[in-house]
């Protein structure tokens, strides 16, 4: 049977109706029937939902929609108000996080090898199923994370994608112990990954076009903060490209020392210009992409974030202004992470 508390028959939210430039209003208000949990599902009352650049890519059509009128949002913090009959690890009232990775097949060679982020049949919250830009959200219990009660919901939300993806990107960058890390772009994900790198003894150089982001980087402990196309003050052992700007890939590669690695963090990137082998790749420089995350990444990062006391810079928006939050994200007017909270 399904266990539940009193829930409304309908809920309010936002959906991507016709993808296009943010100025055309692709995100619209919707009223939907309250979903019923399947056997393995949790129904959450949303306490906060982060606004990720992936949500913007979906709204603007950079990511092709996988279903009509999808509710975005995959950094969900909520309270369990109903559970499916097969759920045993969560109870009514628990605080739970719903993240980007929503489902995998569990049987392909990638899943069996612990690389479920590469599962060809993987599914994603706010892309393959409705997400957290709404009063309520369904989250598969097997892909949900238990969350601490000691931190407010708005500061927890960005950890569930920006934090987890930033953590995987940092690991993909092969940063050596005590190494020199360059971070290109300094939004929600970057400002969290930087704190992990700093806590582990790295020297961090931030390169971003936003003056406010450069100020934040220095407050968090970065050794330098310069313009996106500037040269860092020393050669880099590793770099992460968070900005979805392909023009920055050769810039970052050229800033690497011998055998350095550039990890590209985003799900979408504008075209990369042609590379010059001698300038950008020779001397065993490495170029890597980052594809989603595994649940192990999520568990490791959330435990690490609590242990080091990671600081989350949040720009809160009422749920009724989700369109404004996306527009501000598109225009680089968000400092840190935008987060939707109930009105």
Image: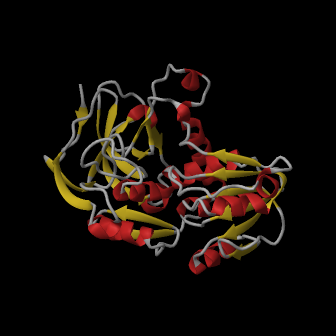
Query: Going by the image, does 250 lie left or right of 52?
Result: right
Residue at image coords 59%, 64%: 311
Q: Position of residue 237 (x, y in %)?
A: 81, 55
Residue 201, percent across and down? 80, 58
In depth, the one of 121 and 278 nearer the eye is: 278
Q: Residue at x 74, y 64 (%)?
A: 204
Q: Is residue 211 above or below residue 252?
A: below
Name the side, left or right, on which 286 lies relative to 25. Answer: right
- Look at 59% across and 52% down and name the residue there: 265
Residue 161 vs residue 310, the one in the foreground? 161
Asked whether residue 131 is in view, the answer is yes
Q: Is residue 317 visible?
A: no
| Quadrant showing the C terminus | bottom left
Residue 143 picture quarter: top left
Residue 32: percent from left, percent from top: 17, 49
Q: Residue at x 22, y 36 (%)?
A: 36
Viewport quadrant of the N terminus: top left
Task: Compare residues 96 and 241 and report the one nearer the observer.
Answer: 241
């Amino acid at each position: 049977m399904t266990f539940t508390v009193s829930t409304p028959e309908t809920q309010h939210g936002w959906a991507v109706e016709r993808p296009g430039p943010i100025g055309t209003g692709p995100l619209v208000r919707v009223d939907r029937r309250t979903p019923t949990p399947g056997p393995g599902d949790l129904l959450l009352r949303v306490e906060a939902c982060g606004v990720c650049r992936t949500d913007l890519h979906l709204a603007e059509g950079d990511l092709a929609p996988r279903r009509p009128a999808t509710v975005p949002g995959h950094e969900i913090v909520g309270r369990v108000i109903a559970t499916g009959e097969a759920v045993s690890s969560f109870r009514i009232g628990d605080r739970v996080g719903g993240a980007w990775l929503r489902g995998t097949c569990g049987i392909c060679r990638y899943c069996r090898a612990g690389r479920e982020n590469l599962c060809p049949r993987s599914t994603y919250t706010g892309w393959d199923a409705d997400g957290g830009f709404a009063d309520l959200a369904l989250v598969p219990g097997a892909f949900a994370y238990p969350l601490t009660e000691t931190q407010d919901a708005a500061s927890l939300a960005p950890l569930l994608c920006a934090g987890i993806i930033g953590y995987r990107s940092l690991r993909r960058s092969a940063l050596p112990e005590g190494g020199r890390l360059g971070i290109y772009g300094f939004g929600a994900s970057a400002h969290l990954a930087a704190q992990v790198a700093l806590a582990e003894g790295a020297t961090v150089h931030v390169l971003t076009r936003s003056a406010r982001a450069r100020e934040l980087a220095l407050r968090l402990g970065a050794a330098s903060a310069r313009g996106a196309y500037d040269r860092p003050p020393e050669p880099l052992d590793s770099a992460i490209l968070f900005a979805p700007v392909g023009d920055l890939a050769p810039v970052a590669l050229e800033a690497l020392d011998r055998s350095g690695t550039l990890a590209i963090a985003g799900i979408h990137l504008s075209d990369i210009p042609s590379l010059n082998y001698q300038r950008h790749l020779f001397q065993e420089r490495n170029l890597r992409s980052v594809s989603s995350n595994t649940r192990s990444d999520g568990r490791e990062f959330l435990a690490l974030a609590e242990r080091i006391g990671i600081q989350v810079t949040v720009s809160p928006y009422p749920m009724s202004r989700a369109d404004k939050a996306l527009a501000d994200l598109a225009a680089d007017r968000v400092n840190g992470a935008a987060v939707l909270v109930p009105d």
